[in-house]
Image (tube, helix red, strand yellow):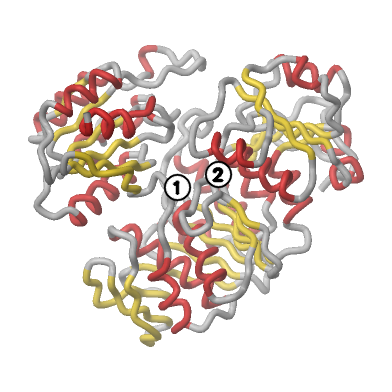
């Protein structure tokens, strides 16, 4: 990796990997500074380094929010708010550069000016933690966090003691990583770009012995021109799987199947239709697990929704393929507690159940909402939605939102999250048009710009037995706790 003689995609002229760091600088670093430490991947990596005895400090544009802020604090990792050359004065011997950092970032400029060894997170992760492990990489537009977490739990519960890196907090583990003594390292593989000097997806650095593609859809409109470009990146992932490896793909996703054609190893499919791994006799979250046409167990999954049936199939396929007896895997899945911000019950106040969920893409919103409506059958489900992701803030899915929120009693939007990305007004989502579309489809919808006012609006209208789900990829300005406190007051 470090001896490459070609410039990676997105690199600056003359900025080759071996000029940014030497192998011994990477493997022997004891004082590591992480730029963008508040992100889920970066914060998790920071915790792993701290647990291994490395002194870690970090910086971010603003103080991190839960759950990552809690995890960083638990490790005693100082976080400097705001980027600047002074953040490097403590003398790190290696700087890990997050993908949110741009070339003109004042701290990045100082890193280069001081000739500090610097590396992207995926490069460091692959070199430091995956070199001697059997890497199980879970990728896809939707479901990868849940599938990664579940796979790690199945291996843990059956005595395989895996390591884990995931962009969320599995409730079974209480944090977004674990360092086990077993041979497996379960990794969530993100398709987002790596660093300003490497514009390829993170998952290309993760050395998969086994890979999963849950599905492929258009997302990350800020860096991908269209879904065909995304599919090409997944083909590159598939090509990394060795001849003696496996690629487990969603048999109902045409793009996943096309990407799998680049795989040199064994390709296995999963789904509710005929597949290598199939869910038959589906009743809610209970189903018969079928492998190559033969029933091998009964699964009673604690996860709600058809999408989570597919996530469970993918995790079971990998775990059983890695030597977990089918009966043990089917038993272990019932002990999975889920992941923070995925159908997470934040509390119940005045008879109102408040949920937190990460969904921010129309497909994820549709599937998540359908699962919540089924879970709380007959109860009114109110949705509060924060438009904050780089895709949802754009018009690219303007027409999809009306269908995505079907089943909701009422949908509420706060003002879109403002980012310093200079997104032109004509490219931004038209919330008034979304409201009109939702109303035309029979779903009442309103824009209440400020979160405090949104909370007040709900408090006056919800009743015992109702369910409120706040959907956001961020902290949603404390919406969930504010609502619970207001209801209790």
* Residue 376: % across, % down: 17, 53
Visible residue check, residue 463: yes
Answer with left or right where residue 455 lies relative to residue 43.
left
- Foreground of the two, 334 or 251: 334
Asked if residue 275 is positioned above or below residue 45 in the image, the reply reads below
Number of numbered callouts drawn: 2
Residue 451, position as x, y percentages in the image: 30, 21
Q: Which residue is mark 2?
A: 191
Residue 482 position, x and y percent, is 31, 28
Q: Which label belongs to residue 141?
A: 1
- Quadrant of the rendered structure where residue 280 is? bottom left
Residue 189 image point, x, y percent: 57, 50
Q: Nearer the viewer, residue 71 or 331?
A: 71
Element type where label 2 sits in the image: loop
| Relative to 270, residue 147 above or below | above
| Residue furthest to the front | 489
Question: What residue appears at the point 19 percent right and 32 percent down from the top-left corner?
Answer: 411
Query: Which residue does the image show at 37% across and 28% down from the upper left?
Result: 478
In the displayed structure, does residue 370 sit left or right of residue 66?
A: left
Disc number for residue 309: none
- At horizontal 19% and vertical 43% (from top left) the residue drawn is 467
Residue closer to the observer: 230 or 299: 299
Residue in the picture at 48% in, 72% down: 317
Between marks 1 and 2, how big is the CA–CA gap?
8 Å
Q: Residues within 10 Å of mark 1 (few under 14, many from 20)?
A: some
Q: Earlier in the sequence, mark 1 or mark 2?
A: 1
In what quadrant of the picture does the C terminus appear?
top left
Quarter assignment of residue 405: top left
Q: Residues within 10 Å of mark 2 (few under 14, many from 20)?
A: many
What SS does tag 1 mark? loop
Q: Is residue 406 visible?
A: no
Q: Are marks 1 and 2 in contact (CB under 8 Å)?
A: yes
């Amino acid at each position: 990796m470090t001896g490459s003689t070609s410039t990676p995609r997105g690199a600056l002229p003359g900025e080759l990997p071996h000029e940014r760091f030497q192998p011994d600088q990477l493997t022997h670093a004891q004082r590591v500074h992480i730029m963008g430490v508040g992100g889920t991947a970066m914060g998790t990596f920071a915790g792993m380094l701290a647990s291994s005895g490395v002194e870690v400090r970090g910086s971010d544009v603003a103080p991190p929010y839960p759950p990552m802020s809690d995890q960083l604090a638990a490790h005693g990792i100082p976080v400097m708010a705001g980027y600047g050359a002074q953040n490097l004065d403590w003398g790190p011997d290696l700087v890990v550069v997050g993908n949110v950092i741009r070339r003109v970032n004042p701290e990045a400029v100082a890193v280069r000016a001081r000739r500090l060894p610097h590396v992207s997170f995926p490069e460091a992760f692959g070199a430091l933690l995956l070199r001697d492990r059997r890497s199980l990489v879970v990728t896809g537009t939707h479901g990868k966090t849940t599938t990664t977490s579940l796979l790690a739990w199945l291996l843990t519960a059956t005595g395989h003691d895996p390591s884990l890196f995931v962009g969320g907090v599995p409730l079974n583990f209480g944090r977004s990583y674990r360092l086990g003594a077993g041979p497996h390292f379960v990794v969530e593989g993100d398709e987002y770009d790596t660093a300003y000097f490497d514009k390829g997806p993170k998952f290309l650095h993760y050395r998969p012995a086994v890979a999963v593609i849950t599905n492929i859809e258009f997302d990350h409109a800020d860096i991908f021109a269209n879904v065909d470009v995304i599919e090409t990146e997944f083909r590159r992932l598939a090509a990394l799987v060795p001849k003696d490896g496996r690629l487990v793909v969603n048999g109902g996703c045409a793009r996943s199947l096309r990407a799998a054609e680049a795989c040199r190893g064994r390709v296995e499919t999963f789904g509710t239709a005929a597949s290598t791994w199939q869910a038959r006799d589906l009743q809610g979250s209970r189903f018969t697990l079928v492998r190559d046409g033969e029933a091998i167990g009964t699964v009673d999954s604690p996860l709600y929704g058809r999408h989570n049936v597919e996530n469970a199939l993918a995790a079971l396929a990998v775990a059983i393929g890695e030597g977990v007896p089918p009966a043990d895997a089917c038993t272990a899945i019932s002990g999975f507690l889920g992941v923070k911000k995925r159908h997470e019950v934040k509390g119940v106040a005045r008879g109102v159940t408040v949920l937190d969920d990460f969904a921010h893409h129309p497909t994820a919103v549709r599937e998540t909402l359908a699962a919540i409506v089924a879970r709380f059958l007959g109860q009114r489900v109110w949705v509060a939605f924060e438009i904050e992701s780089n895709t949802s803030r754009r018009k690219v899915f303007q027409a999809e939102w009306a269908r995505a929120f079907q089943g909701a009693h009422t949908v509420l939007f706060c003002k879109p999250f403002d980012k310093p990305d200079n997104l032109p007004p004509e490219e931004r989502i038209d919330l008034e048009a979304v409201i009109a579309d939702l109303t035309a489809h029979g779903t009442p919808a309103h824009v209440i710009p400020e979160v405090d006012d949104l909370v007040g609006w709900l408090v006056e209208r919800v009743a015992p037995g109702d369910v409120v789900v706040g959907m956001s990829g961020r902290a949603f300005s404390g919406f969930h706790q504010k609502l619970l406190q207001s209801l209790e007051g």
